[in-house]
Image (spheres, rainbow, N blue to C red):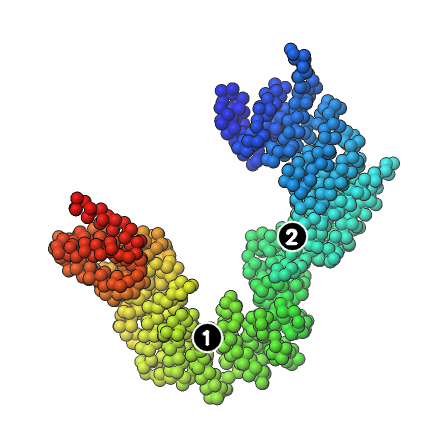
């Protein structure tokens, strides 16, 4: 391919556009493979120098469309410059016929390079590569190197990084200088190094806000430092093994140990370290603290390179300076740069084993570095770099050198791999652990852990906290360190998700170290649970709750009382947490949004743990739950679901644990007080209060509902009603419907039971009518169709109650209730919201397929099983309109479902979503084509449409989509069978209904839809056609211009004009 592209470029007949396209493809290849590798593939014969130079000279540097051509030509020219001949041989006689001197090839190339070092595109990078290879040639360095460096430094001094032009110029000069000092010989560059360093100091690049300039400055400084120092490999550096694989295999382990211990001494050479090195190292140490990662990374590599050429004592001083970055006075940038530098030093064998006792504790701190900044934290890059250090150490040091630190590093890496918040840090720690297991071979249980905590499994944070942590903690070497890390670093984390996962992890780890949890962890958590820091307090309370419940599970498993694990002092501390927080008023404000669900969780876990009766604390717990439910409207919207769920769950556990007497009854006073108070609160003017107490009633245990069922159901029924004041209270209606189902499932079913105690004949109609009534809730507000929440809760509750009755007392499922239920579900499964349609279809098919025993009185059960075969139930995607509507429209053939399915299809076909409209309309038309020749079926279908129109007059949710659907049906000739008859009743009734619908309306959308229907009805012959034309003429005179401009009306105007002329 390269040869083909170069042939196009060299061909004199190729157009400029074709040549540029060839260069563009060359650039793409170099971008993928890297220019350093691609550079070697260019032809670099003597004959190539002049053509390439002529091509680059002919380029226009200001043409931003062809920068790829200039970039590739400069790279090609840099390769042709490597020819092993003096360039003067290419010049011949430089004198011209007029007596003027021609410019030499050397000067031409330098001029090209200089001109492209100050351009704003990527050609500047290629020009720097050209300079590095050209200026360092033996013939050029003697004649032009000094002049070029002088031009570069003068240009650099004049440039200012505060202007865009100055930034571009400084970028080019710094790149050129860095490349020259990288590729040039030390003896050639050394005379100029001091001057360059002095000029660089005057530029003060460290003060620039341009990242690339600071990075290039650091690269140039390190190259200058390497120029000042002699090229040598430090004899004092630590070496593990040999570079030869054969030598490593022949070497015995004892030889390896001897080699690692008896390192060769440094050769004492008589040469002084230049004074400039101090300045270089100082600048590099400052670069380690730079705010940008690429600058710190480049600096770290520079420190590694320069340290490798220093004597042992000076190198040790550099290591000490790097370790100074790990002070808690330093920023996270300094910690990150320090980690990168240590990794580079260790990888190069410049960090001697004698320094490991100083370095390892620092790295262990870096592995858990996490500094809070406002509402978040910084430090993930530090932890990631610390993992890189551990990875580098695994490859750099002999296992004997690392033996004293194995347990510490292994525990720290596993803690990071399992509990770090960021996935990249978890994966980095996992990779470092795996590297140590493979290279060192001394990590306890390394192979077993690596197979479980691998790169992919640690990708899921929940899996790490809840599953992998349990497996790893099962090894005694790691259990306490993991528990301590959760208690000290994670339960007080700024991220609430991490705090909650940490407490659940402590619950799972409790069976592994129950004595440690009881004797050490809980006493440490109790003071924190009432401390001053909000996040610590929140995490500590949740941790106390989870550990207590885990200890209770152990007592049940071992058939022991809970007091064997929890002494009186600990129990008293747990019970008094609520009162202490109440006394300090810590439930108020934003902090209360964390404290309330946390303490409710504590109440739930203490209740489930069967602790001894806490006395008066129960009333305090009950007051907290009631107050939380009552004031839900005062908390933020995002926190409401969590707080509501926590309070309701705590109430259920509290009632079951402390309100039930030995005989299984409840104290009447307590029952009356709670149930009466909750039913009263259902009439609150606050929607969230209704939500909370509705779900609270649904969570009450059976003994609390005894003799109160009818009152509870009646109270919940009133919440589901839509009245003027609470029409927008969709969430309260949703939660009341959920509560009704929960209450019914709690009390159970008895056919002849009492309506105050059981679901029975007397109250089953109340339950079904309440739920079925909510299936037609289409309330909308600024949030959209909020009624969908109510409908979803209603169908879920209907399914649960119907299945409950079917399994216990099928006789209570009346035919009318079952028909209304199935028809309502069929209607919802044909509507426009994809997610809701899929959920409805799932409920519908669950009822059809249920056979334990089958639901009685389902209309057309056999037809339903034929339309929806069980084999396709899992594969059919109801959320996809293309799959759902072809199935749903088949229900139109079943008389019991036709009205409701057509009602649902009306909203879909006349909707706004393109895919829904397309597939629903296509499926409807396909069905109509099947029955178009059947007059009786078409008559029945048309009557159903007219009935829907009558039932939904002035209901714009249905009437407007219905007219849009009728427009499509009339336009597609779906009623051709009626056109043969003059004044067909269908057309007459449809005209009357449409006229009534738009009477006195100002809804433009409705008016425009009616125009489309009128135009579609013109196809019907007889007296009706005159009436339709009269209606259209009236609309021509409508006061709204947009109505008069409607396309059908314009067409009508044109037709009238033609008739009159």
Q: Residue 23: x and y, percent?
A: 54, 29
Residue 132, located in which quarter of the rendered image? top right
Q: Residues within 10 Å of mark 2 (few under 14, many from 20)?
A: many
Quarter-wise, where is residue 996 in the image? bottom left
Whether residue 246 is visible to the viewer of this picture, yes or no, is no
Q: Quadrant of the C terminus?
A: top left
Of the image marks 1 and 2, the number of the one nearer the N terminus: 2
Query: Could you tell me which residue is drawn at 71 percent across and 57 percent down?
Result: 365
Question: Is 707 situated above or below 190?
Answer: below
The CA span between labels 1 and 2 is 47 Å
Q: Nearer the viewer, mark 1 or mark 2?
A: 1
State the residue in front, 847 or 167. 167
Residue at screen point 56% across, 73% down: 596
What number of labels is visible? 2
Q: Is any atom of residue 816 visible in this view? A: yes
Point out the residue furthest to the top here.
Answer: 97
Residue beneath label 2, please? 381
Q: Is residue 928 left or right of residue 1041?
A: left
Residue at (69%, 54%) from the top-left corner?
332
Would you place residue 312 above or below residue 90 in this image? Answer: below
Residue linked to disc 1? 686
Classify residue 93 as left or right of residue 269. Answer: left
What is the x, y in percent for residue 339? 70, 50
């Amino acid at each position: 391919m390269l040869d083909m592209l170069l042939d196009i470029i060299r061909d004199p007949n190729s157009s400029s556009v074709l040549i540029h396209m060839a260069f563009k493809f060359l650039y793409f290849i170099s971008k993928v493979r890297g220019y350093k590798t691609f550079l070697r593939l260019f032809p670099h014969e003597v004959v190539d120098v002049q053509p390439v130079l002529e091509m680059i000279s002919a380029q226009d540097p200001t043409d931003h469309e062809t920068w790829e051509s200039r970039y590739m030509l400069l790279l090609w020219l840099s390769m042709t410059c490597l020819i092993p001949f003096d360039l003067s041989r290419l010049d011949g006689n430089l004198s011209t016929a007029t007596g003027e001197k021609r410019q030499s090839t050397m000067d031409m190339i330098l001029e090209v390079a200089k001109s492209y070092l100050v351009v704003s595109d990527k050609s500047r990078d290629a020009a720097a590569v050209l300079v590095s290879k050209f200026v360092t040639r033996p013939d050029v360095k003697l004649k032009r190197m000094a002049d070029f460096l002088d031009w570069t430094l003068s240009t650099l001094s004049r440039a200012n990084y505060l202007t865009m032009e100055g930034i571009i110029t400084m970028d080019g000069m710094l790149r050129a200088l860095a490349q020259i000092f990288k590729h040039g010989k030390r003896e050639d560059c050394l005379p100029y190094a001091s001057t360059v360093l002095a000029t660089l100091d005057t530029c003060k690049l460290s003060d620039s806000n341009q990242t690339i300039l600071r990075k290039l400055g650091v690269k140039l400084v390190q190259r200058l430092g390497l120029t000042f120092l002699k090229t040598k490999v430090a004899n004092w550096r630590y070496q593990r093994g040999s570079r030869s694989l054969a030598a490593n295999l022949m070497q015995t382990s004892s030889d390896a140990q001897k080699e690692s211990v008896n390192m060769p001494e440094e050769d004492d050479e008589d040469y002084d370290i230049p004074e400039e090195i101090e300045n270089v190292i100082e600048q590099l140490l400052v670069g380690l603290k730079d705010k940008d990662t690429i600058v710190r990374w480049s600096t770290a590599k520079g420190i590694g390179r320069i340290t490798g050429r220093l004597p042992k004592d000076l190198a040790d001083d550099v290591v000490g300076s790097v370790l100074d970055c790990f002070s808690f006075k330093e920023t996270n940038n300094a910690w990150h740069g320090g980690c990168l530098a240590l990794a580079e030093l260790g990888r190069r064998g410049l960090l001697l084993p004698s320094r490991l006792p100083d370095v390892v504790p620092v790295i262990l701190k870096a592995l858990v570095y996490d500094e809070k900044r406002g509402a978040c934290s910084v430090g993930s890059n530090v932890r990631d770099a610390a993992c890189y250090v551990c990875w580098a150490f695994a490859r750099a040091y002999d296992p004997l050198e690392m033996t004293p630190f194995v347990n510490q590093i292994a525990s720290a890496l596993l803690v990071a791999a399992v509990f770090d918040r960021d996935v990249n840090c978890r994966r980095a720690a996992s990779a470092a652990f795996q590297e140590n297991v493979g290279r060192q071979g001394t990590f306890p249980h390394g192979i077993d852990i690596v197979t479980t905590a691998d790169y992919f499994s640690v990708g899921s944070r929940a899996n790490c906290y809840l599953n992998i942590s349990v497996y790893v903690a099962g090894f005694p070497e790691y259990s306490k360190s993991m528990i301590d890390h959760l208690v000290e670093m994670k339960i007080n984390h700024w991220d609430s998700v991490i705090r909650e996962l940490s407490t659940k992890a402590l619950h799972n780890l409790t069976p592994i170290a129950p004595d440690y949890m009881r004797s050490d962890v809980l006493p440490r958590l109790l003071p924190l649970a009432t401390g001053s820091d909000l996040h610590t307090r929140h995490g500590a309370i949740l941790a106390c709750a989870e550990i207590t419940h885990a200890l209770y599970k152990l007592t049940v498993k071992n058939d022991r009382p809970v007091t064997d694990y929890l002494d009186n002092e600990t129990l008293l501390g747990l019970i008094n947490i609520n009162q202490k927080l109440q006394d300090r008023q810590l439930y108020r404000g934003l902090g209360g949004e964390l404290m309330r669900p946390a303490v409710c969780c504590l109440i739930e876990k203490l209740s489930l743990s069967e602790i001894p009766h806490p006395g008066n604390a129960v009333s305090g717990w009950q007051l907290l739950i009631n107050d939380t439910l009552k004031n839900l409207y005062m908390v933020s919207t995002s926190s409401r679901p969590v707080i509501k769920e926590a309070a309701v769950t705590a109430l259920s556990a509290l009632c079951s644990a402390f309100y039930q007497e030995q005989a299984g009854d409840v104290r009447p006073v307590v029952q009356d007080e709670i149930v009466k108070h909750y039913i009263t609160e259902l009439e609150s003017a606050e929607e969230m209060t209704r939500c909370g107490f509705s779900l609270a009633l649904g969570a009450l245990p059976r003994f609390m509902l005894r003799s109160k069922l009818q009152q509870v159901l009646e109270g919940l029924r009133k919440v589901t009603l839509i009245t003027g004041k609470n029409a927008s209270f969709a969430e309260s209606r949703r939660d009341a419907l959920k509560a009704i189902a929960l209450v019914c499932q709690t009390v159970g079913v008895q056919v002849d039971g009492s309506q105050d105690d059981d679901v029975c004949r007397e109250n089953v109609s109340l339950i079904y009518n309440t739920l079925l009534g909510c299936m037609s809730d289409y309330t909308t507000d600024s949030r959209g169709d909020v009624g969908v929440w109510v409908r979803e809760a209603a169908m879920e509750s209907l399914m649960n109650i119907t299945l409950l009755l079917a399994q216990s007392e099928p006789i209570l499922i009346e035919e009318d209730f079952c028909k209304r239920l199935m028809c309502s579900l069929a209607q919802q499964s044909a509507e426009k919201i994809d997610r809701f349609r899929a959920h409805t279809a799932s409920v519908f098919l669950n009822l059809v397929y249920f056979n334990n025993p089958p639901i009685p009185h389902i209309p057309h059960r056999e037809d339903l099983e034929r339309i929806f075969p069980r084999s396709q139930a899992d594969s059919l995607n109801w959320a996809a309109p293309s799959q759902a509507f072809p199935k749903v429209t088949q229900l139109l053939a079943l008389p019991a479902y036709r009205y409701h399915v057509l009602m649902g299809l009306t909203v879909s076909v006349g909707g706004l979503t393109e895919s829904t409209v397309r597939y629903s309309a296509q499926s409807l038309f396909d069905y109509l084509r099947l029955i178009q020749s059947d007059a009786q079926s078409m008559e029945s279908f048309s009557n159903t449409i007219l009935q829907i129109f009558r039932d939904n007059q002035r209901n714009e949710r249905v009437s407007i989509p219905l007219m849009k659907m009728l427009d499509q049906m009339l336009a597609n000739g779906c009623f051709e069978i009626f056109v043969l008859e003059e004044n067909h009743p269908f057309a007459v009734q449809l005209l009357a209904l449409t006229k009534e619908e738009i009477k006195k309306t100002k809804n433009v959308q409705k008016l425009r839809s009616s125009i489309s229907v009128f135009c579609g009805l013109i196809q019907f012959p007889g007296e009706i056609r005159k009436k339709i034309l009269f209606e259209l003429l009236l609309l021509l005179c409508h006061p709204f211009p947009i109505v008069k401009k409607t396309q059908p009306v314009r067409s009508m105007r044109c037709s009238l004009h033609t008739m009159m002329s």
